[in-house]
Image (cartoon, grey):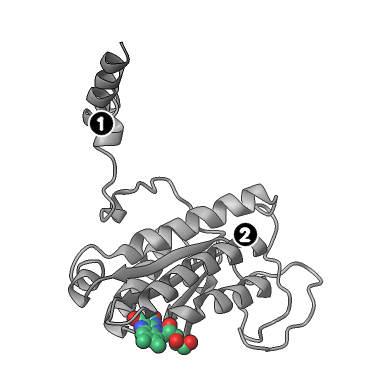
Amino acid sequence: MRLTLSAALLAVAVDGFGSKRLPSLRQGVRVQDANAVSFDGLDGSNARIGIIRTKWNPKVVDALSDGAKSACLDVGVLEENIFETQVPGAWELPSAARFLALSGRVDAIVCIGTLIKGETMHFEHISEAVASGLMSVQLQTSVPCTFGVLTVLDESQAAARSYAGENHGVSWGKTAVEMAVLRAEALGLAKKGTINLGFSEADTSKKLPGAAPEKKVFF
Ligand code: RBF
């Protein structure tokens, strides 16, 4: 009896846990098929998006951040509501994301970088730390941070996901906008103007009446 049950369970497992009854799982989005995720109907016209990119691997990162920016524009984000800055490497992304989130200037941040595995353990340390760092920042600040860091084994994998193939920056940009909209709705900010904590001279976003005068710190 026990043997029959085990055999039945094994058969189900081999069959993909009844995948015939779950076609959507079998036909779902492939891991590398990032731009197959649907963002239909996304309206970013009230969203303020930060894009932070690394200086490392500029050819790949340029393509990714260009993809993210044009995706934001495509879904209606105003050019003046896209804030761009850069950091030295991926390791620095969580700190910069936290500074930007705390500045109050953006509703979501796309954090873009590329880590290419080398001969030492840096790849494992940095990728793990950046992933958990960005998760901490978004949970602590309530500003969503898109994980836009390619963690690849070689340059050709990075190329295939940026300048020479399906540009993952596009879906990261739209993901940030979707999260910005979700955040605004969740926090009841959707109908208000932009909250600005006065960190920047060059802030061109909308302001609440009576907002404090701005002074430039970093962002
Ligand atoms: N930063 C990246 O964004 N991508 C990389 O592929 C990358 N590789 C690195 C390899 C080594 C051995 C080291 C020490 C750093 C690397 N960095 C890379 C830089 C890192 O993210 C950070 O900027 C520096 O470690 C300074 O904090």
Q: Which mark is residue 16?
A: 1
- Whether residue 4 is visible: yes
Residue that appears at 50% across and 81% down = 92
Residue 200: image x %, image y %?
A: 66, 83
Q: Is residue 181 left or right of residue 51?
A: right
Residue 118: image x %, image y %?
A: 28, 80
Provide the residue designation for mark 2.
139
Image quadrant holding the C terminus, namely bottom right
Question: Which residue is farthest front?
Answer: 2
- Whether residue 107 is visible: no
Q: Nearer the viewer, residue 211 or 28?
A: 28
* Kind of residue indicated by mark 1: Gly
Quarter assignment of residue 34: bottom left
Foreground tag (1 vs 2) = 1
Helix, strand or loop for disc 2: helix
Image quadrant holding the N terminus, namely top left
Helix, strand or loop for disc 1: loop
Task: Answer above or below: position of 190 versus 79.
Answer: above
